[in-house]
Image (cartoon, rainbow, N blue to C red):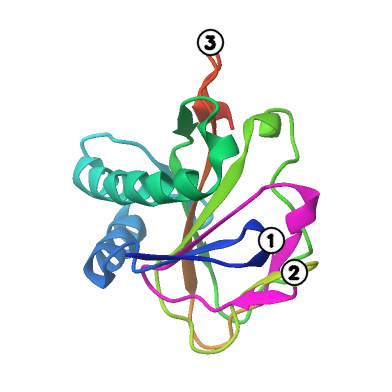
Amino acid sequence: MHIKFLPDYIIYAKGLLTPATCFNIIDKFNRDPDQNAGELVIKPSATWRGLHSEIHRQVCAAIAQIVQKYKPLQVGPLAWTDYKIKRYEKSSGSFNWNFEALGPTAWQRQLTMLFYLNDVKAGGETCFLYQNIKVRPVAGDAIFFPPFWTHTHSDLTTETENKYIMTSYAGFAIPGVSTNAA
């Protein structure tokens, strides 16, 4: 894994997950009877334990590098939500500009984590409005960024294949507050 710190607190993690791990996540996701409308939250249950552990190990390694660079993230222990897998069908949908710090429990979020699980040859880029940055989906790569209005983003519609992503949010571990609600 190679971490690259882009302008305005956008972090690009090249090779966070291996292509084989991404393939296994997509395969298991597509066969999972619990997925609903192309979405599934995975937990360290018996079904997902091995892959969940592998993902979590790599996320911990990336977060360790990120907090070394951004010291304010060291004011307290970090915790993150369960991982949510999403499938976007090719040539469908349009994505409005949005940011992640919306909703009743979103106040806990300090860092958005977005993992690309497959390559998308045409379209599918994540675009940041104010930073003028576009990130093309490459299997195994991830981006980390603040969830606030300062990092308003959108995804372009995929033109050639379905797009698979996984997301999670990191926040400070506050006693008595569940991170799964973030």
Report the magenta residues as a range. 132-156
Disc on the earlier residue, 1 or 3: 1
Task: Give the residue at x 43% y 76%.
Answer: 138
Q: Nearer the viewer, residue 95 or 108?
A: 108
Tag 1 secondary structure: helix
Q: Residue 128: horizontal and vertical position, in percent?
A: 72, 68
Disc on the earlier residue, 2 or 3: 2
For the residues labelled 2 and 3, the Cα–Cα distance comes to: 36 Å
Mark 1 or mark 3, whichever is nearer to me = 1
Q: Is residue 11 above or below residue 157?
A: above
Q: Residue 60: horizontal and vertical position, in percent?
A: 35, 44
Numbered badge on residue 8: 1
For the residues labelled 1 and 3, the Cα–Cα distance comes to: 32 Å
Residue denoted by label 3: 176
Q: Residue 104: horizontal and vertical position, in percent?
A: 73, 28
Tag 3 secondary structure: loop
Q: Nearer the viewer, residue 154 or 59?
A: 59
Q: Residue 80: horizontal and vertical position, in percent?
A: 47, 35
Marks 2 and 1: in contact by CB < 8 Å? Answer: yes
Q: Residues within 10 Å of mark 2 (few under 14, many from 20)?
A: some
21 left or right, relative to 40? left
Mark 1 or mark 2, whichever is nearer to me = 1
For the residues labelled 1 and 2, the Cα–Cα distance comes to: 7 Å
Task: Give the residue at x 26% y 44%.
Answer: 48
**In the picture, residue 56 is in which quadrant?**
top left
Marks 3 and 2: in contact by CB < 8 Å? Answer: no
Q: Nearer the viewer, residue 145 or 176?
A: 145
**In the picture, residue 134 is in which quadrant?**
bottom right
In the picture, the quarter occupied by the N terminus is bottom left
Task: Give the residue at x 41% y 50%.
Answer: 65
